Image: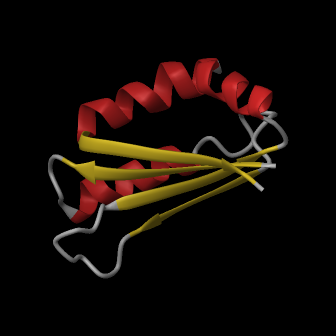
């Protein structure tokens, strides 16, 4: 199992924009066959070091994660939306 975690810091941190980012991430549910687990949440602490939204996804293998990365919905819809709305995006991928 491979876990892919991504944190998003928005350029415009309004409640509407933050909810739109979370909703766009959750819209991947059912659209990408390789995606075994999907959750997205909005930060509740709001500290200076916090990011605004977190994405946690799981895949059966690294190959499935790579397939997800280039999937037309992810690469063509989700990634451009995130890049247009975020000032910083960081990720960690690990096996286990």
User: Horizontal and vertical percent for residue 50?
Assistant: 27, 68
Give the residue at x 78% y 26%: 63
Q: Looking at this rendering, what residue extends furthest in the bottom direction?
A: 45
User: Horizontal and vertical percent for residue 58?
Assistant: 72, 50
Quadrant of residue 56 within the rendered picture: bottom right
Q: Is residue 68 left or right of residue 50?
A: right
In this rendered view, identify the residue nearer to me: 46 or 33. 46
Instruction: Using the image, determine if residue 18 lies above or below residue 67.
Output: below
Instruction: Using the image, determine if residue 39 lies above or below residue 87.
Output: below
In this rendered view, identify the residue nearer to me: 82 or 14. 82
Q: Looking at this rendering, what residue extends furthest in the front direction?
A: 95
How many marks the image carries: the answer is: 0
Give the residue at x 46% y 45%: 91
Give the residue at x 16% y 46%: 11
Instruction: Using the image, determine if residue 7 lies above or below residue 87.
Output: below
Give the residue at x 36% y 32%: 81
Q: How is the image coloured?
A: secondary structure
In this rendered view, identify the residue nearer to me: 76 or 16. 76
In this rendered view, identify the residue nearer to me: 52 or 29. 52
Q: Is residue 50 left or right of residue 36?
A: left
Instruction: Using the image, determine if residue 70 lies above or below residue 4.
Output: above
The C terminus - image quarter:
bottom right
Q: Is residue 88 left or right of residue 71?
A: left
């Amino acid at each position: 199992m491979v876990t892919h975690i991504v944190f998003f810091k928005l350029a415009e941190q309004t409640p509407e924009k933050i909810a739109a980012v979370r909703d766009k991430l959750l819209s991947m549910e059912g659209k990408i066959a390789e995606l075994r687990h999907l959750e997205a949440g909005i930060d509740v602490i709001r500290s200076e070091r916090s990011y605004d939204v977190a994405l946690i996804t799981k895949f059966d293998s690294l190959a499935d994660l790579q397939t997800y990365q280039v999937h037309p919905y992810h690469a063509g819809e989700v990634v451009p939306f995130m890049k247009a709305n975020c000032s910083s995006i960081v990720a960690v991928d690990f096996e286990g």
